[in-house]
Image (tube, rainbow, N blue to C red):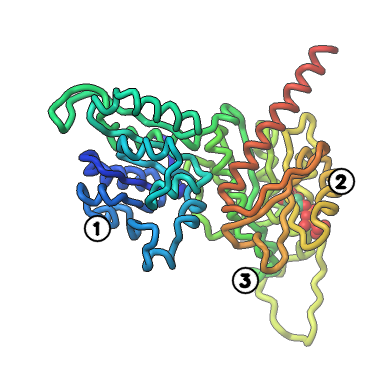
Amino acid sequence: MGSLSNKHLVLGVTGGIAAYKSADLARRLRELGAEIRVVMTRAATEFITPLTMQAVSANPVRLHMLDAEAESGMSHIELARWADAVIVAPASANFIAKMAHGRADDLLSTLCLATEAVVALAPAMNQQMWENPATQDNLARVKQNGVRVFGPAQGAQACGETGPGRMLEPTEIAARAAELFSTGALDGRHVLVTAGPTWEALDPVRGITNRSSGKMGYAVAEAALEAGASVVLVSGPTALADPEGVTTVHVRSAQEMLEAVHAQANNIDIFIAVAAVGDYRPETVAPQKIKKHSDTLTIKLVKNPDILASVAALSPAPFTVGFAAETENLEHHARKKLLDKRIDLIVANDVRVGSAGFDSDYNQLLLIDKNGVIELPRARKIRLARALIQRVAGKYHAKSTAQDSRYAHR
Ligand code: CTP
């Protein structure tokens, strides 16, 4: 089964007997790694208690638009932005009808209207209601608007009838939820990502490093995995857990990162250098801890190898993507790096104090290549990473196709 690791899911519960299965669904989604926030309609609370849903989701349950307590924590707009996907299970005939007409008369319907995230419905209703042309029209309309529909299943119903309208089982819904994130854009491709800072030792206890948290690089590795690639992540020292399903190689110095990258570089299709590699390292590493014998201490630094440029210089080279962290003249400096390092794409981000960037969960990016600039506005790093991977996949495939047709004409 796929993974939902690091995914933010809103689980919407509407009124129907299948709501008793929503508690199990919350557990299944969490087992796949998702963080869950539950939103219940008033009718849903007649079938299952908010306390049960709070216990299984490990978060407070939201019930009302104007919920004084919850409002301070997360408003419906924040919740709409927070979600990577909204799964409504069970989705009643009434809820589907409301979605088909864009109604927003309670928290869940408002949230579905306000979110950019994918919305998926798991319908559950009596088979006559399911087959009613009005319901089928509403379904066609929501599908046309990009809403995904999971099920329903056939079988015995709580009302004693048999037919279509049973909610899919929670394990099936959880599996479908994980599939929402598998784009297949990089199916069968090999992607290598560097992430985090490097550590350039001065002596056995001290070293030179930088403020990179590794979050963006790890998010890029996860997004590449979601897109179907097999992914190797070469990471400098970070506090992050290894992403599930990604082969993670831990290194400390730029030299170690270079070696780990070149051990893979001949077998990859795409190289994405997100690491904040130290440009310089101490010329010598003291074998013992340096003592403060004098008032000043001079450390001579020598330049580190440029890992990204060295991969871009390979023949044949993979599709290469660099990152440029800048504090001024973002586009100008980034474009210079694109040309100097002879890479395919550079991703620029502003790391001035107070802006998104280092150690934040948010970022904003400019994607710059020979064809122009694309802006990815401020969003969570995992979302930006997905958007980036989608663009990288498009550009990688376009370049491969162009190269293939050039060879064919020789
Ligand atoms: N990079 C690398 N190896 C290095 C230095 C940087 O692979 N030794 C990669 C980074 O992973 C990133 C890009 O190159 O993708 C950053 O370019 P760089 O010119 O090193 O950026 P800065 O260090 O910020 O450069 P400057 O200090 O000149 O602004």
Residue at image point 30% right, 42% down:
25
Q: Name the secondary structure under disc 2.
A: helix
Which residue carries the number 2 mark? 340
Earlier in the chain: of badge 2 and badge 1, it is 1
Q: Position of residue 250 (x, y in %)?
A: 58, 51
Horizontal arrangement in the rendering, residue 365 relative to residue 17 (left or right): right
The amino acid type of the residue labelled 3 equals Val
Residue identified by numbered label 3:
205
Query: Disc 1 versus disc 3: distance between alpha carbons?
Result: 50 Å
Q: Which residue in the structure is indicated by mark 1?
A: 51
Q: Secondary structure at mark 3?
A: loop
Q: Amino acid at mark 2?
A: Asp
Image quadrant where residue 208 sits: bottom right
Distance from Cα at disc 2 to Cα at disc 3: 35 Å
For the residues marked 2 and 1, what is the alpha-carbon distance in whole angstroms?
Answer: 59 Å
312 or 253, which lies in front?
Answer: 312
Callout 2–callout 1 Cβ contact below 8 Å:
no
SS of the residue at dot 1? Answer: helix
Q: Earlier in the sequence, mark 2 or mark 3?
A: 3
Numbered label attached to residue 370 = none
Kindly indicate whether the residue at mark 3 contacts the one at mark 2 (C-beta within 8 angstroms): no
Whether disc 1's CB lies below 8 Å from ligand 1 is answered no
Name of the residue lying farthest toward the left: 160
Nearest the eye: 333 or 341: 333
Residue 124: give x, y in percent of width and height: 28, 34
Question: The disc labelled 1 sits on which kind of residue?
Answer: Leu
